Image (cartoon, rainbow, N blue to C red):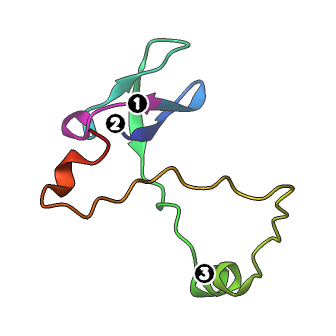
Amino acid sequence: MPLYEFRCEECGVFDVWRSMAESSSPAHCPECNEQGRRVFSPPMTLSRSQVAKAVSSEPKMVKVDREPKTSNVQYHSGSRPWMVGH
């Protein structure tokens, strides 16, 4: 469910989690219980420069302290490969 902003004339802005079907109906203020009107705010988006900055940044170096364990995979050369380890 999305989070919607509403404005009460006396108390100010408050947020309400609602389904999209109920998005246009007024909400009651949690402080004074008066009906509040929905405030339309722009969605949070990234600009092209913010995306380019995130893509161009270098990845962090990760150091492995020990060698990885050897694999316990068993290979089967018979006619029934689904019966590996049986």
User: Does dot 1 land on a helix, a strand or a loop?
Assistant: strand
Residue topped by disc 3: 51
Give the left or right position of residue 29, taking residue 52 as reference.
left
| Distance (Cα) linking label 2 and label 1 | 6 Å
Amino acid identity at mark 2: Met
Q: Residue at x 70, y 83 (%)?
A: 53
Q: Which picture quadrant has residue 79?
A: bottom left
The residue mark sitting in front, 2 or 3, is 3
Establish if 32 lies above or below 67: above
The C terminus lies in quadrant: top left
* Sooner in the amino-acid sequence: mark 2 or mark 1: 2
Give the left or right position of residue 75, taking residue 57 as reference.
left
* Sooner in the amino-acid sequence: mark 1 or mark 3: 1
Q: Residue at x 62, y 55 (%)?
A: 70
The magenta region covers 16-22
**Circles 2, 1 touching at the beta carbon (< 8 Å):** yes
Front residue (pair 5, 61)? 61
Amino acid identity at mark 1: Trp
Establish if 60 lies above or below 34: below
Q: Is residue 19 magenta?
A: yes
How packed mark 3 is, by other alpha carbons closer than 10 Å (few <14, some 14-19, many 20 or more), is few
Q: Residue 80, percent across and down?
A: 14, 55
* Sooner in the amino-acid sequence: mark 2 or mark 3: 2
Q: Residue 78, percent across and down?
A: 19, 60
| Distance (Cα) linking label 1 and label 3 | 29 Å
Give the left or right position of residue 23, taking residue 57 as reference.
left
Q: Which picture quadrant has residue 57?
A: bottom right
Residue reaching furthest to the left: 79
Front residue (pair 9, 50)? 50
Circle on res. 1: 2
Residue topped by disc 1: 17
